[in-house]
Image (tube, rainbow, N blue to C red):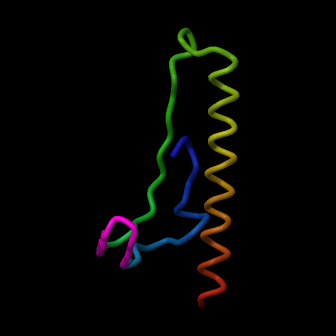
Amino acid sequence: MLGLSLKSLLFDDSIPVDIHLEIPAHDVSVTLTGSVAPVVNSLSAPTDLIQDSDIASFVQLRQTLEQIARLVQSTLNAIQ
């Protein structure tokens, strides 16, 4: 996730998850069951092909992902 380490930010072990999605307008009902595991990922773009606007986009994407991670963490804390 562009260098965002969810392992230290959210949790250290894998956790089981169940996701239930319903879209009544389209008569859709989906259930996903599995687990979420923390990993450390990073993305390295070649510097000879990247432009300043691309870097700014990556920075904005990382900030957005960090905000989402903080939201998920606060939600998990509120549930516990």
Depicted 54 relative to depicted 36: above or below: above
Q: In which quarter of the image is residue 77?
A: bottom right
Give, as a single range, the part of the protein colored magenta: 18-33
Depicted 50 relative to depicted 26: above or below: above
How far from the left and from the top, in percent, is residue 18? 36, 79
Residue placed at 58% from the left, 49% from the top?
Answer: 4
How far from the left and from the top, in percent, is residue 17? 38, 77
Outermost residue toward the front in this view: 25
Question: Tag count in the figure?
Answer: 0
From the image, give the main secondary structure of the stretch colored magenta: strand
Depicted 9 relative to depicted 20: above or below: above
Depicted 10 relative to depicted 44: above or below: below
Q: Quadrant of residue 66?
A: bottom right
Q: Nearer the viewer, residue 31 or 10?
A: 31
Would residue 43 appear left or right of 35 to someone viewing this image? right
Outermost residue toward the bottom in this view: 80
